[in-house]
Amino acid sequence: MSLAQLNVDQIKPLLAPLAEQARKLIGQGKVADYIPALKQVASNQFGVAVCDINGNVISFGDATTPFSIQSISKLFTLVQAIKIYDETLWEKIGKEPSGQRFNSLVQLETDHGIPRNPFINAGALAVCDRLESRLSAPNYQLIELLQKLAKNPFIKTNLKVARSELEHGSRNAAMAYLMKAFDNFANPVEKVLESYCHHCAIEMSCVDLAKATLFLANSGVDLNGDKILDRSQTVRINALMATCGLYDASGEFAFQVGLPGKSGVGGGIVAIHPKHFSICVWSPELDEFGNSKAATEFLKILTDELKISIY
Ligand code: GLN
Protein backbone atom coordinates (compact mmCIF):
# COMPACT_ATOMS: atom_id res chain seq x y z
CA MET A 1 0.00 0.00 0.00
CA SER A 2 1.26 3.47 -0.82
CA LEU A 3 2.00 5.36 2.36
CA ALA A 4 0.93 8.60 0.72
CA GLN A 5 -2.63 7.31 0.94
CA LEU A 6 -2.65 6.33 4.58
CA ASN A 7 -5.53 7.87 6.51
CA VAL A 8 -8.14 6.85 9.05
CA ASP A 9 -10.60 5.63 6.39
CA GLN A 10 -8.22 2.82 5.45
CA ILE A 11 -7.58 1.84 9.05
CA LYS A 12 -11.21 2.02 10.25
CA PRO A 13 -12.48 -1.30 8.81
CA LEU A 14 -9.56 -3.12 10.44
CA LEU A 15 -10.16 -1.94 14.01
CA ALA A 16 -12.97 -4.35 15.00
CA PRO A 17 -11.56 -7.55 13.44
CA LEU A 18 -8.01 -6.90 14.65
CA ALA A 19 -9.27 -5.99 18.12
CA GLU A 20 -11.13 -9.28 18.26
CA GLN A 21 -7.93 -11.11 17.40
CA ALA A 22 -5.81 -9.18 19.92
CA ARG A 23 -8.42 -9.61 22.67
CA LYS A 24 -7.75 -13.35 22.56
CA LEU A 25 -4.61 -12.65 24.61
CA ILE A 26 -6.65 -11.25 27.49
CA GLY A 27 -6.35 -13.74 30.33
CA GLN A 28 -2.69 -14.52 29.59
CA GLY A 29 -1.17 -11.38 31.14
CA LYS A 30 -1.28 -9.76 34.55
CA VAL A 31 -2.60 -6.36 35.65
CA ALA A 32 0.12 -4.31 37.41
CA ASP A 33 -0.20 -4.94 41.13
CA TYR A 34 2.96 -3.41 42.57
CA ILE A 35 0.99 -0.15 42.78
CA PRO A 36 -2.01 -1.46 44.79
CA ALA A 37 -4.54 1.07 43.44
CA LEU A 38 -3.85 -0.12 39.87
CA LYS A 39 -4.85 -3.72 40.45
CA GLN A 40 -8.51 -2.76 40.88
CA VAL A 41 -8.84 -2.11 37.13
CA ALA A 42 -11.07 -4.57 35.21
CA SER A 43 -8.64 -6.61 33.14
CA ASN A 44 -10.87 -7.43 30.17
CA GLN A 45 -10.97 -3.88 28.78
CA PHE A 46 -9.61 -3.04 25.33
CA GLY A 47 -9.64 0.23 23.43
CA VAL A 48 -7.93 1.79 20.43
CA ALA A 49 -7.94 5.25 18.87
CA VAL A 50 -6.13 6.61 15.82
CA CYS A 51 -5.64 10.26 14.88
CA ASP A 52 -4.38 11.07 11.39
CA ILE A 53 -2.44 14.20 10.53
CA ASN A 54 -5.57 15.92 9.29
CA GLY A 55 -6.92 15.58 12.83
CA ASN A 56 -9.51 12.89 12.00
CA VAL A 57 -10.03 10.45 14.86
CA ILE A 58 -11.40 6.91 14.75
CA SER A 59 -11.76 4.56 17.66
CA PHE A 60 -13.04 1.19 18.79
CA GLY A 61 -13.89 -0.52 22.08
CA ASP A 62 -13.18 1.15 25.42
CA ALA A 63 -11.51 4.08 23.69
CA THR A 64 -13.07 6.83 25.77
CA THR A 65 -12.48 5.19 29.16
CA PRO A 66 -9.80 7.07 31.10
CA PHE A 67 -6.95 4.89 32.38
CA SER A 68 -3.74 5.50 34.31
CA ILE A 69 -1.18 6.76 31.80
CA GLN A 70 1.76 5.78 34.05
CA SER A 71 5.02 5.83 32.06
CA ILE A 72 3.39 7.40 29.01
CA SER A 73 3.69 10.56 31.14
CA LYS A 74 7.48 10.26 30.66
CA LEU A 75 6.97 11.24 27.04
CA PHE A 76 5.27 14.49 27.95
CA THR A 77 7.63 15.46 30.77
CA LEU A 78 10.47 14.90 28.31
CA VAL A 79 8.76 17.30 25.89
CA GLN A 80 8.49 19.92 28.64
CA ALA A 81 12.15 19.47 29.58
CA ILE A 82 13.37 19.65 25.97
CA LYS A 83 11.45 22.89 25.51
CA ILE A 84 13.24 24.37 28.51
CA TYR A 85 16.72 22.84 28.33
CA ASP A 86 17.07 21.75 24.68
CA GLU A 87 20.52 20.13 24.16
CA THR A 88 21.72 20.81 27.71
CA LEU A 89 19.15 18.32 29.02
CA TRP A 90 21.47 15.53 27.85
CA GLU A 91 24.45 16.54 29.95
CA LYS A 92 23.67 13.90 32.59
CA ILE A 93 20.83 11.88 31.04
CA GLY A 94 21.68 9.22 28.43
CA LYS A 95 20.09 8.28 25.12
CA GLU A 96 20.84 4.56 25.02
CA PRO A 97 18.51 1.60 25.48
CA SER A 98 18.99 0.11 28.92
CA GLY A 99 18.24 -3.57 28.23
CA GLN A 100 17.10 -3.74 31.86
CA ARG A 101 13.76 -3.55 33.68
CA PHE A 102 12.24 -0.10 33.80
CA ASN A 103 12.84 0.18 37.54
CA SER A 104 16.23 -1.50 37.76
CA LEU A 105 18.83 0.03 40.08
CA VAL A 106 21.81 -2.04 38.97
CA GLN A 107 22.89 -0.01 35.96
CA LEU A 108 22.50 3.31 37.75
CA GLU A 109 25.28 2.36 40.15
CA THR A 110 27.69 1.17 37.46
CA ASP A 111 26.86 4.21 35.29
CA HIS A 112 27.73 6.61 38.14
CA GLY A 113 24.20 7.93 38.60
CA ILE A 114 23.62 8.79 34.94
CA PRO A 115 20.38 7.15 33.78
CA ARG A 116 20.60 5.39 30.42
CA ASN A 117 17.59 7.21 28.91
CA PRO A 118 14.63 9.42 29.90
CA PHE A 119 12.03 6.62 29.55
CA ILE A 120 13.20 4.30 32.33
CA ASN A 121 12.15 5.36 35.83
CA ALA A 122 15.57 6.73 36.81
CA GLY A 123 15.73 8.85 33.65
CA ALA A 124 12.21 10.18 34.11
CA LEU A 125 12.98 11.04 37.73
CA ALA A 126 16.03 13.00 36.52
CA VAL A 127 13.81 14.78 33.97
CA CYS A 128 11.29 15.62 36.74
CA ASP A 129 14.17 16.94 38.84
CA ARG A 130 15.18 19.30 36.00
CA LEU A 131 11.54 20.42 35.67
CA GLU A 132 11.26 21.00 39.41
CA SER A 133 14.17 23.47 39.11
CA ARG A 134 12.41 25.52 36.46
CA LEU A 135 8.63 25.16 36.74
CA SER A 136 6.57 26.86 39.43
CA ALA A 137 3.86 24.14 39.48
CA PRO A 138 5.03 20.95 37.67
CA ASN A 139 1.82 18.96 38.26
CA TYR A 140 -0.51 21.69 37.15
CA GLN A 141 1.67 22.58 34.15
CA LEU A 142 1.74 19.01 32.86
CA ILE A 143 -2.05 18.70 33.17
CA GLU A 144 -2.41 22.03 31.39
CA LEU A 145 -0.20 20.81 28.51
CA LEU A 146 -2.15 17.53 28.20
CA GLN A 147 -5.53 19.28 28.26
CA LYS A 148 -4.38 21.52 25.44
CA LEU A 149 -2.80 18.75 23.34
CA ALA A 150 -5.85 16.47 23.69
CA LYS A 151 -8.33 19.35 23.59
CA ASN A 152 -9.96 17.94 26.70
CA PRO A 153 -10.32 20.23 29.76
CA PHE A 154 -11.38 17.28 31.96
CA ILE A 155 -8.05 15.45 32.07
CA LYS A 156 -6.93 15.10 35.68
CA THR A 157 -4.80 13.13 38.13
CA ASN A 158 -6.30 10.23 40.07
CA LEU A 159 -5.16 11.23 43.56
CA LYS A 160 -5.83 7.79 45.01
CA VAL A 161 -3.41 6.22 42.51
CA ALA A 162 -0.83 8.96 43.12
CA ARG A 163 -1.02 8.36 46.89
CA SER A 164 -0.81 4.59 46.46
CA GLU A 165 2.26 4.95 44.27
CA LEU A 166 3.93 7.34 46.71
CA GLU A 167 3.32 4.90 49.56
CA HIS A 168 4.86 2.05 47.56
CA GLY A 169 7.61 4.01 45.83
CA SER A 170 10.69 2.80 47.67
CA ARG A 171 12.49 1.71 44.50
CA ASN A 172 11.91 5.07 42.84
CA ALA A 173 13.10 6.82 46.02
CA ALA A 174 16.21 4.62 46.00
CA MET A 175 16.99 5.63 42.39
CA ALA A 176 16.54 9.31 43.14
CA TYR A 177 18.78 9.13 46.24
CA LEU A 178 21.41 7.21 44.29
CA MET A 179 21.43 9.93 41.62
CA LYS A 180 21.69 12.54 44.38
CA ALA A 181 24.69 10.70 45.80
CA PHE A 182 26.30 10.99 42.34
CA ASP A 183 25.48 14.71 42.23
CA ASN A 184 22.89 14.23 39.49
CA PHE A 185 19.78 15.42 41.32
CA ALA A 186 19.34 19.02 42.44
CA ASN A 187 16.01 19.09 44.29
CA PRO A 188 14.68 17.40 47.43
CA VAL A 189 13.93 13.77 46.54
CA GLU A 190 10.52 13.74 48.26
CA LYS A 191 9.34 16.76 46.30
CA VAL A 192 10.33 15.30 42.92
CA LEU A 193 8.85 11.90 43.78
CA GLU A 194 5.58 13.59 44.53
CA SER A 195 5.40 15.25 41.11
CA TYR A 196 6.59 12.08 39.36
CA CYS A 197 3.83 10.01 41.03
CA HIS A 198 1.21 12.62 40.22
CA HIS A 199 2.30 12.60 36.57
CA CYS A 200 2.06 8.80 36.37
CA ALA A 201 -1.40 8.87 37.99
CA ILE A 202 -2.92 11.14 35.33
CA GLU A 203 -5.86 9.48 33.60
CA MET A 204 -6.51 9.78 29.89
CA SER A 205 -8.40 7.71 27.33
CA CYS A 206 -7.12 6.22 24.07
CA VAL A 207 -8.82 9.07 22.21
CA ASP A 208 -7.11 11.65 24.48
CA LEU A 209 -3.69 10.05 24.00
CA ALA A 210 -3.98 9.59 20.23
CA LYS A 211 -4.85 13.28 19.96
CA ALA A 212 -2.21 14.39 22.47
CA THR A 213 0.60 12.60 20.61
CA LEU A 214 -0.39 13.76 17.15
CA PHE A 215 2.31 16.47 17.16
CA LEU A 216 4.93 13.68 17.14
CA ALA A 217 3.54 12.49 13.79
CA ASN A 218 3.14 16.03 12.52
CA SER A 219 6.66 17.51 12.78
CA GLY A 220 5.95 19.05 16.19
CA VAL A 221 2.64 20.77 15.37
CA ASP A 222 -0.34 19.83 17.57
CA LEU A 223 -4.06 19.46 16.83
CA ASN A 224 -4.60 23.16 17.52
CA GLY A 225 -2.03 24.07 14.87
CA ASP A 226 0.47 25.17 17.56
CA LYS A 227 4.14 24.33 17.35
CA ILE A 228 5.04 22.24 20.41
CA LEU A 229 8.57 21.30 19.33
CA ASP A 230 10.64 22.04 16.26
CA ARG A 231 11.11 19.36 13.64
CA SER A 232 14.52 18.20 14.78
CA GLN A 233 13.43 17.95 18.44
CA THR A 234 10.39 15.93 17.31
CA VAL A 235 12.34 13.38 15.27
CA ARG A 236 14.72 12.92 18.20
CA ILE A 237 11.87 12.12 20.57
CA ASN A 238 10.57 9.59 18.04
CA ALA A 239 14.06 8.08 17.80
CA LEU A 240 14.18 7.69 21.59
CA MET A 241 10.74 6.09 21.57
CA ALA A 242 11.90 3.66 18.89
CA THR A 243 15.00 2.64 20.83
CA CYS A 244 13.91 2.94 24.47
CA GLY A 245 10.11 3.39 24.64
CA LEU A 246 9.26 -0.17 25.65
CA TYR A 247 12.16 -0.69 28.07
CA ASP A 248 13.92 -4.04 27.64
CA ALA A 249 11.33 -5.08 25.04
CA SER A 250 12.12 -2.13 22.75
CA GLY A 251 14.04 -4.31 20.30
CA GLU A 252 11.22 -6.85 20.10
CA PHE A 253 8.67 -4.05 19.60
CA ALA A 254 10.75 -2.55 16.78
CA PHE A 255 11.03 -6.00 15.25
CA GLN A 256 7.34 -6.92 15.56
CA VAL A 257 5.59 -3.55 15.25
CA GLY A 258 8.09 -1.22 13.64
CA LEU A 259 6.81 2.08 15.01
CA PRO A 260 8.22 4.39 17.70
CA GLY A 261 6.18 3.68 20.83
CA LYS A 262 5.82 4.39 24.53
CA SER A 263 4.15 2.12 27.04
CA GLY A 264 2.94 2.41 30.62
CA VAL A 265 2.06 -0.13 33.29
CA GLY A 266 -1.56 1.08 33.15
CA GLY A 267 -1.68 -0.99 29.93
CA GLY A 268 -1.56 1.86 27.41
CA ILE A 269 0.80 2.02 24.43
CA VAL A 270 1.09 5.04 22.14
CA ALA A 271 2.78 4.68 18.77
CA ILE A 272 3.63 7.11 16.02
CA HIS A 273 3.77 6.76 12.27
CA PRO A 274 5.65 9.94 11.35
CA LYS A 275 3.75 12.03 8.79
CA HIS A 276 0.74 9.69 8.96
CA PHE A 277 -0.91 9.07 12.33
CA SER A 278 -0.69 8.62 16.07
CA ILE A 279 -2.36 5.66 17.75
CA CYS A 280 -3.11 4.62 21.32
CA VAL A 281 -4.08 1.06 22.26
CA TRP A 282 -5.05 0.08 25.80
CA SER A 283 -5.64 -3.18 27.60
CA PRO A 284 -4.57 -3.52 31.25
CA GLU A 285 -2.95 -6.97 31.32
CA LEU A 286 0.84 -6.81 31.01
CA ASP A 287 3.59 -9.14 29.83
CA GLU A 288 6.77 -9.83 31.82
CA PHE A 289 8.34 -6.56 30.61
CA GLY A 290 5.47 -4.41 31.92
CA ASN A 291 3.95 -3.76 28.46
CA SER A 292 0.33 -4.49 27.53
CA LYS A 293 0.04 -7.91 25.92
CA ALA A 294 -3.12 -7.30 23.87
CA ALA A 295 -2.11 -3.75 22.88
CA THR A 296 1.26 -4.97 21.60
CA GLU A 297 -0.46 -7.75 19.67
CA PHE A 298 -2.94 -5.32 18.13
CA LEU A 299 -0.15 -3.03 16.94
CA LYS A 300 1.77 -5.96 15.54
CA ILE A 301 -1.13 -7.29 13.48
CA LEU A 302 -2.17 -3.80 12.37
CA THR A 303 1.28 -2.94 11.03
CA ASP A 304 1.58 -6.41 9.46
CA GLU A 305 -1.77 -6.08 7.77
CA LEU A 306 -1.07 -2.60 6.40
CA LYS A 307 2.65 -3.29 5.84
CA ILE A 308 3.59 -0.03 7.51
CA SER A 309 6.60 -0.79 9.69
CA ILE A 310 8.78 2.31 9.29
CA TYR A 311 11.86 0.16 8.80
N1 GLN B 1 4.58 4.74 37.96
C1 GLN B 1 5.28 3.57 37.52
C2 GLN B 1 6.56 3.39 38.30
O1 GLN B 1 7.18 4.37 38.71
C3 GLN B 1 5.54 3.75 36.06
C4 GLN B 1 6.21 2.53 35.46
C5 GLN B 1 5.72 2.19 34.10
O2 GLN B 1 4.65 2.60 33.64
N2 GLN B 1 6.49 1.37 33.43
O3 GLN B 1 6.98 2.29 38.54
Image: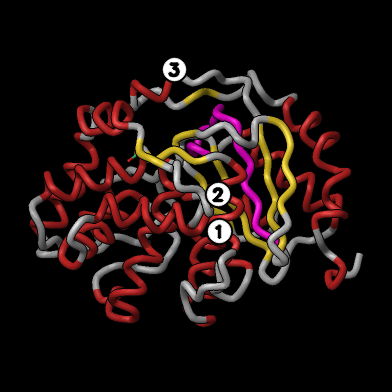
Viewer-nearest residue: 144 or 83: 144
Q: Specify whether residue 179 is in view.
A: yes
Q: Amino acid at mark 1?
A: Thr
Q: Give the alpha-carbon distance from disc 1 to disc 3, as whole Å.
A: 27 Å
The spot of residue 212 in percent (x, y) is: 53, 56
Q: Amino acid at mark 2?
A: Leu
> Within 10 angstroms of label 2, few (less than 14), some, or many (20 or more) residues?
many
Seen in the image, is 179 located left or right of residue 42?
Answer: left
Q: Give the number of the disc on residue 209.
A: 2
Q: Earlier in the sequence, mark 3 or mark 2?
A: 3
Seen in the image, is 110 located left or right of residue 33?
Answer: left
Secondary element at image label 2: helix
Viewer-nearest residue: 299 or 221: 221
When the figure is inspected, residue 71 is found, relative to residue 136, above or below; the finding is above
The mark total stands at: 3
Q: Earlier in the sequence, mark 1 or mark 3?
A: 3
